[in-house]
Amino acid sequence: MVPSQEAHKLVLSFADDELCVGQNHSWWIAIGPFLEEDLAFTSIAQDELGHARALYSLLSDDIDQLAYGRDHSEYRSAHITEFLCHDWSSALVRHVLHDMAEQVRWSALTNSSWTELGNTAQRALAEENFHLQHGLSLLRRLLSSDEGRKRLEPVVLELAPYGREYFADSDQELMDNGLLTVSMADQERIWVDQVLEVFDEFNITVDMSEETQGSGRSGIRSNDFATLHDEMTAVIQIDPHAQW
Amino acid sequence: MTITQSDLETVRSAVGSVKDPEYPDLTINQLGILENVVIDASSIRVDLVPTILGCPALGIIEEDVKAAARGLGHEVAVRFCRSPVWTPDRISEDAQQILANEYTIAITPRSGRTQCPVCGTTSLEKRSDVGPTACRSVHWCANCRNPIEVVRSREASDQ
């Protein structure tokens, strides 16, 4: 049983974020920059889709309907997860920003008063260490080269502020009933500090002071969402009763 | 029909013998995927622990478990548990031997360095975070010069 409407919204936001990132990552299958990265990125996509499935299943038995059958305005995904990132540099930066946020978000749920959600968070967190370790080590190696820095720095500056939207859910009620154990404001602060620290190593100063740029939590989709949604629902549109 | 303790035992043994789709020599019991067989609302429920949440084989395992129970005349429900968290040390000793000998797959130990399943040294060097499946990384043994796969632990300390 979902404890409340606010709890439903929180889980749906997280699930939609995971679905969009998983779908976007999967576009790199077979075209990753080198074989090992292709395999790793694909596996991370698989994990994120698995997390989406686990979260949706807390809300409904019909997870396909939740994942694919809603009106665009009913999705709650943060815009940073919807961006198509057709350049490898932006795909990599989004991967790192997303996984840093995931660490913080899952950690805020492991002791949730909603036991099933807490267990899901512990289960997911166990898979996340590898994602972040992988993404950060590659990012650091690339930022250490002139070419890598030239291509990555503008993307970091552009994408990072969008990540603040990960923490744009309302949390008063969730904090009061122990469903969430770290407030959204504190989660955001932890994430921002970690992001600033990572890029500070390379003397890249990210300006996070701007107002949150996305508005995905309130039902407004980014320009890229329609393309993403068409792709992920291509099969179900052809055959709504397909079994796989 | 009343379910007896011996019914549960028979079902447990049958579903425990279901082969894992990725390792056809090993059963879900040996791999630590089978958690429990219990009576739930006057029917039998099988609790399974997924190795990873995004495992694409979950649907196959669920169908195979139901079919194994059906073979004994029992309809069972299958539940994938979020708790406990699956870790490589849930793999039984004998299964770890089969993985080492037949597949050259090593398991990250709780403490200490991972041993090469071919030569027994700890000369493994990581070559790729991910191998043929999401839960295994690929290493190279600098001593016996064999490619080795390692089942990743939850801490990812499979170095």
Image: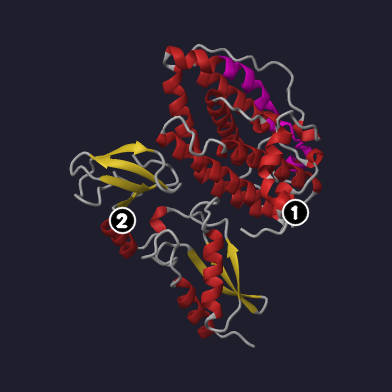
- Local crowd at mark 2 within 10 Å, few (<14), some, or many (≥20)? few
Element at label 2: helix
Circles 1 and 2 on the same chain: no
Total numbered labels? 2
- The chain identifier of the residue carrying mark 2 reads B
| Residue A208 shows up from this direction | yes
Q: Are marks 1 and 2 in contact (CB under 8 Å)?
A: no
Q: Is residue B6 left or right of residue A16?
A: left
C-alpha distance separating marks 1 and 2: 43 Å
Q: Is residue A144 above or below residue A44?
A: above
Residue lying furthest front in this view?
A238
Q: Quadrant of residue A169?
A: top right
Bounds of the magenta segment: A154-175
Q: Which residue is mark 1?
A: A2
Image point (56%, 23%), residue name = A195
Image point (61%, 36%), residue name = A24
Q: Is residue B137 left or right of residue B97?
A: right
- Local crowd at mark 1 within 10 Å, few (<14), some, or many (≥20)? some
**Residue A56's x, y, as percent?**
68, 50
Q: Looking at the image, which is closer to me, B53 or A236?
A: A236
Q: At label 2, which amino acid type do we have?
A: Tyr
Q: Is residue B8 above or below residue A129?
A: below
Element at label 1: loop
Q: Is residue A46 above or below residue A27?
A: below
